Amino acid sequence: MLTRDFLLKADCKTAFGAIEESLLWTSEQRAASLAATLTCRPDNKPVWIFGYGSLMWNPVFEADEVAQGTLSGWHRAFCLRLTAGRGTAQQPGRMLALKEGGATTGLAFRLPEEKLHEELGLLWKREMVTGCYLPTWCELELDDGRSVTALAFVMDPRHELYETDSCPQTIAPLIAQASGPLGTNAQYLFSLEQELKRRGLYDECLTDLVQRVRDLQEYHNDLVG
């Protein structure tokens, strides 16, 4: 289970599993990325973070406010090859990212200004272990009618772990089998489905994928049973 205490103490070289040395970002690289992102902060407005995956049910950072919202122009896709955390290089899974097109419903977290650098540093340690995302300032429409600027972690299509094929029939067998130090890849998918349902949100791209993964797991259990 990923916790705040785990992240604070984690050595990124080992805590998430074996990560290829050439992919692993140093603490200096993460700090430079964070500094560059904050340099582009629009008009020193409050910093919001858009959560569309595990940040929704397990943010671990502190927030002064949480609100549901919709991000236009981006959609969820399991397009990130997962070789650590909930997968391994020998049996990779797939992790969620944002790709251009469509829209995504999720949660917006407003960070406390007095703890901004501390909370963002923790977030960068979680999300930017290999620098696979592009932290991007996006316009986000909250369900209460407000429009805010939020940071979203979108997929870097130039990254070595980027996968172009994220069709359910391709990725379901990977997700059904992959696991690592943080748990199974399937549990990540099921947790996302449960959190969306709990909040009355819906993402049609998950429906077929969830069913395929469940069917594969049931088939495997029948075989070994």
Image (cartoon, rainbow, N blue to C red):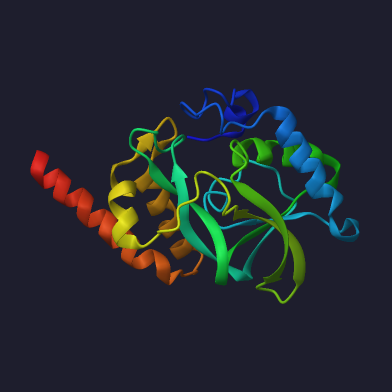
Residue 115: x and y in percent read 81, 40
Q: Is residue 182 or residue 163 the one in the foreground?
A: 163
Image quadrant of residue 23? top right
Horizontal relation, residue 163 to residue 124: left or right: left
Instruction: Please give the name of the residue rendered at 66% of the width and 51% of the height, measured from the top-left corner.
Output: 134
Horizontal relation, residue 168 to residue 201: left or right: left
Image quadrant of residue 132? top right
Residue 148 vertical position relative to residue 14 in the rendered view, above or below: below
Instruction: Please give the name of the residue rendered at 86% of the width and 49% of the height, measured from the top-left corner.
Output: 39
Residue 87 is at least partly visible in this image: yes
Q: Residue furthest bottom?
A: 145
Residue 112 is at least partly visible in this image: no
Instruction: Please give the name of the residue rendered at 76% of the width and 67% of the height, measured from the top-left corner.
Output: 148
Residue 224: x and y in percent read 10, 39
Q: Total label count? A: 0
Instruction: Please give the name of the residue rendered at 46% of the width and 54% of the height, measured from the top-left corner.
Output: 79
Residue 104: x and y in percent read 56, 68
Horizontal relation, residue 116 to residue 165: left or right: right
Which quadrant would the C terminus be assigned to in this image?
Answer: top left
Image quadrant of residue 117? top right
Residue 179 vertical position relative to residue 195 in the rendered view, above or below: above
Residue 1: x and y in percent read 47, 34
Q: Is residue 82 or residue 4 the one in the foreground?
A: 82
